[in-house]
Image (cartoon, rainbow, N blue to C red):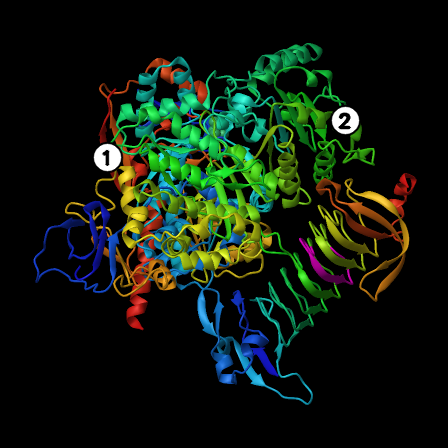
Amino acid sequence: MPHIEAVTCPVCGCLCDDIRLRIEAGKIVEVKNGCAMCESKFLGYCGEHRLSKPLIRKNGELVEVSLNEAVKKAAEILAEANYPLLYGWSSTSCEAIRIGLELAEEVGGVIDNTSTVCHGPSVLSIQDIGIPSCTLGQVRHRADLVIYWGCDPWSAHPRHIERYTSFSDGRFEKSEWKGYLSKTKALIVKKKIEKALKRVFARETPSLSPHVRREPPPTLFKEGRKMIVVDVRRTRSAETADYFIQVEPNRDYELLEALRLLVRDEELEVEEVAGVPVAYLEEVADLMIRCNFGALFFGLGLTMSRGKMRNIDAALSLIRDLNTRTKFTIMPMRGHFNVSGSDTVFTWQTGYPYAVDFSLCYPRYNPGETSAVDVLLRGETDASLIVASDPVSNFPRKAAEHLVKNPLIVIDPHVNATAQMGDVVIPSALVGVEVEGTAYRMDHVPLPLKKVVEPPEGLISDEEILRKILSEVRKIKAGKMEES
Amino acid sequence: MIVLTPSRQLPFPVMAECISPDVFQEKTLEEIGELAVWEGNKQKKLADLFKVEEQNREGENEATITICGDVAEVRRIGASMTIGEIMIEGNVGMHLGEEMKGGKITVHGNAESWAGSMMKGGTIEIYGSAGDYLGAPYRGCGEGMRGGQIVVHGDVGSEAGAYMKKGLLKIKGNAGQFAGLRMHGGTILVEGNCEARAGACMTEGKIVVIGFLESVLPTFTIEGVRNKVKIKETDSIEGPFYIFSGDLAERGNGKLYVSKRKNPHLSVFEKLL
Amino acid sequence: MSNGVVFDPLNGIDGEKVDIAVKDGKIVKSVSEHRAKKIDVAGMIVMPGGVDIHSHIAGSEVNTGRLLRPEDHFKDSECKTSVTRSGVGYSIPSTFTTGYRYARMGYTTVMNPSMPPLEAKHTHEELNDIPLIDKATYPLLGDWWFVLEYLSQGNIEELARHVAWMINSTKGYAIKIVNPGGLESWGFGHNVTSLDDQIPHFCITPREIILGLCRVNKLLNLPHSVHLHTNNLGKPGNYKTALETMKYVEELANDEKPAVHITHCQFSAFTGDDWRTLGSGAEEIAKYLNGHSHVTIDMGQVIFTDTTTMTADGPFQFGLYELTGNKWVNHDVETETSAGIVPFRYRKKSFAHATQWSIGLELALLVKDSWKIYMTTDHPNGGPFTAYPKIIAWLISKKARKATLKKINPKARSRSLLPSIDRELSFYELAIMTRAGQAKALGLKHKGHLGVGADADIAVYNVNPHKTDPSKEYKKVRKAFKRAAYTIKGGKVVVKNGEVLKHVEGATMWLDVKISEPFKVTADMKRRFREYWTVEYENYPVTDRYLEISQPIPVKAEV
Ligand code: SF4
Ligand SMILES: [Zn+2]
């Protein structure tokens, strides 16, 4: 029974690459080091939602067909379209994305990745302000102040804190795990001991306790790593933090702007900003200035709340300003395991990270105009190809309606809502489990995705499927050229 | 005068920067019809999409283009134009008059986002509403409106006049969030109500809100109350107005004038005076 | 290829009519006359394909630059054609466009000078997508913790073995050092200001890093010297640091091979105490170079345009942000290096920018031996590589220099040395500065010349050197060098009259450094790996599948 070491987990943007798998009879039977999300991926990937045969809709029913037939049909749809959309990409390999871009260029379509509905606004802000950032190891080694803003790593990126920030051991800064444990223990004593113990070890979200005070606690000014969480509600991560700042919903922008003023030692005229007393904010600002290395991570709670990209503007500006006083970095908590890679490949081939429109034979970019949701809402597309994503369940209803009204091609290992509505559905092998590839971590570190088991009979990678469609499209186009 | 009438529905985006008096000038109707446009990913001729006709009425400017019908998917009309006039009887698509330097565009309908984007001169008048990013620059570019005038009779979306340096934006309806974001000159007048974050990160210039302003950023400081504010050399509006200055987060010295009568919630600032 | 006027300095051919035979991608003695495809290039200049020793074309820093600047791209797009992919410019072109634009100017080999080892896979993935040119890339090693630690222990041989491992693991080509010590200090927001500053936490100085890695370079027998971006880059008065650095490695001088390459030297050749008193240190540096042969440099010429600066020198880029207020990206890489990006416009009317422009050209003209200085813009730092024809015009024509001098800041003009310099480079010297010299400095045996056995990378420019006076007709020359009449890559005509005819992939060259006994990954190494990086040892190296066309160059080390 062989073990495979150093496997990269193809789930979230943490892209942990220390997963150890035990394989028996061609199946994964044990997962070490991973979090719950990782385990369920590696152990449950073969579940009932798996697709096994290509399907085409005939007379309203999806019927099984050969791969060649499905590929041909997909190519016909794309080659004929006046304004096709190619969407998804964040949960597949960079190798597949490369071919996807070539296909989009060939068919003169709009190609967009899931950034468009997550950190797209963050990218737009980066294009206005820039971004002082670093790789995650830099935070592990050096950060003595970690801020999570509008994100809950405990639930969305379960190993982020342990591998990269407050609970990791670095060269210049040590893990605060022990301190956290004793703090938690003290808490446990206060509560019903058994119940609390069960919660900690079963990793369930404990019910929220009001132990985090509004006022910055004195411990915040001691030596060692500090963690601050800013959010609209008290999440599990907030419980872990040394200090939790509860911001009024949709008022992050004001809070960030106020901090920008305070880190320049200037005075605010108001007494409270976004529900937080300015006196507390002054202490936080002071902490930010006095740290040796600060790191702010932000999530969709900031990107998607009122003000969107401009919230990120303010956050980026704050961190940039702080660099005149100390060292401070900022990073978006990217969700899908390869959404960074998707932005990266888009950028090197086209100059733009997402929402790229090839309809004029060259790459054009203007989110709002060329982004997936917007072109669907305006009803502009006449065909779509969805790769490794489920827009039918997570796009606005009107956008999803337009998507399914027109010919829809889906490439995905699983049956999701989009696949069920598809006209051509091509199942693929699972990247990072059944086929290899490359993905980029949230800090842009590229990591190899491994093949650890054989794919089910007849299934090939997204990359190979896309290559087949591309060559079929070229054949159709060459045929048309000859005719004319 | 050249009259363009869409000859069918236009469901796909159409790129038509050729619809501009500068381009039409001294061209015959046939030549105009031959001009290249893109519809979705197909290259077409203008005449494929529009009926192109000439109508000459007394005293009319020759360099006038009239578009009769809904062209909400037709983009970049009047881009970079320097002379003449475009009249649109219907809704119009994005990037109307992008980087225009002179002449006039009138829209009897709504305009999509980025109308007057990076405008340098001339006038745009929209009788309906306008989308987001009115007069604002392209992504990543710090140069917004540098001259000219945009008048919108209806409402506008967010970030109207972002990065504006010079010129005038008159909004007779309501304005969305972040009006005058990062502006460093010029004037924005909002006659209706205005959502929050007006003037965020502005360093110079003037924003006047005659209606209700949702809130003032904490990084603005109150300077006083004034009875009148000048909009143009000759134009001024009666107040009284609260004057705020900011955005201090950018060490800015922009001015935000807010009607006192319509904004009793801002009276708390009076005690700071 | 017949009847061309050939400039092939490595073979001593200076403007002679020589016919060139090509077979299977290589230059051969002769081919069968009647079966060969013939190209008549009568009255045209024939040179080896251009070689660029330092141009940022791929990797995380370049790509973040692309991402940062949609406004740089949106007015400079290239359409897809039946043979080419689409893309965008301007200062940071997308990958395909990068390849096409180089090839259009007759360039066939480009070195990407800064690769964070941890992100090496990214660099190689991008290099795969740059067509028509051969490439190689230099890993950034100057502030790698292993380097700092082994050097502070004085363990050069062990370090050499680790550097060999690193070059193999990252599929790199040379040792790149950037602001040694400064980048580690930048980890906490600090910098070093002299060669003798202590680097916090590591008990070592920039001086020791430079000398140590130069020694390692010798021990490993690497074909190129250490590729160095000096301390204090971009600061008034820094020519002293540059000179001190050069002098310090004098002891490693060896007749055959230089010990160090000071890259984009213009940025390290400032006199003065601040931006107002900024002046040119070109004379001093040229004087030193004229008397010594252990140093080579490249220009890092400034072009008056809007561009994007990007270096691994994090603190320098931060300074540039503070100076301009433009958008700023910083990207520190754990255990290894840092990077920064700031858009920048060089203006003719700015005293500092105009002075920089002058310094670059002064260096190129005052260094007597063209084998010691190469033409670069440190793309895109001084300006995009597409500006090379402009530089060529300034180098071959005093008239061209005068025309630009007229338009620059008057104070900079009055202080410029250029009016006093009469030298105008010949086509032969130009061929050295743009290909032969660069290939020689890089130790690329098959590049930069047209001798038998060389790669059939050839550039043909439609200008007749016998009928053109470059000094007067510099515009004609500039035009010819902008759009090559032919670019031949590996024996294939890829460009004709400035148009790309074919999309062929270029190779990635890397050093397969062989040490006496194979590198053993000890338990200690694995432990340190776990502690230092956030990725596993197994996932760190660039495996073969990351190089689409891999061209290993074996090197036998002395350790
Ligand atoms: S944190 Fe994310 S990448 Fe790491 S093991 Fe969990 S799901 Fe996988
Ligand atoms: Zn460089």
Left/right placement of residue B104 relative to residue A143 reads right
The residue carrying mark 2 is A280
Q: Please tell me whether residue C18 belongs to the stretch shown in magenta.
A: no
The boundaries of the magenta stretch are B160-175
Q: Quadrant of the N terminus of chain A?
A: top left
Q: Nearer the viewer, residue C276 or A54?
A: C276
Q: Position of residue A44 (x, y in %)?
A: 43, 31
Q: Position of residue C466 (x, y in %)?
A: 25, 63
The residue carrying mark 1 is C553
Chain of residue at mark 1: C
Chain of residue at mark 2: A
State the residue at coordinates (89%, 39%): B272
* Callout 1 amino acid: Ile
Q: Nearer the viewer, residue C452 or A322?
A: C452
Does label 2 point to a residue whose CB lies under 8 Å from ligand 1?
Answer: no
Q: Position of residue C351 (x, y in %)?
A: 57, 48
Whether A470 is drawn above or below C363: the answer is: below
Marks 1 and 2 close (CB-CB < 8 Å)? no
Q: Which mark is residue A140?
A: none
Whether B271 is drawn above or below A70: the answer is: above
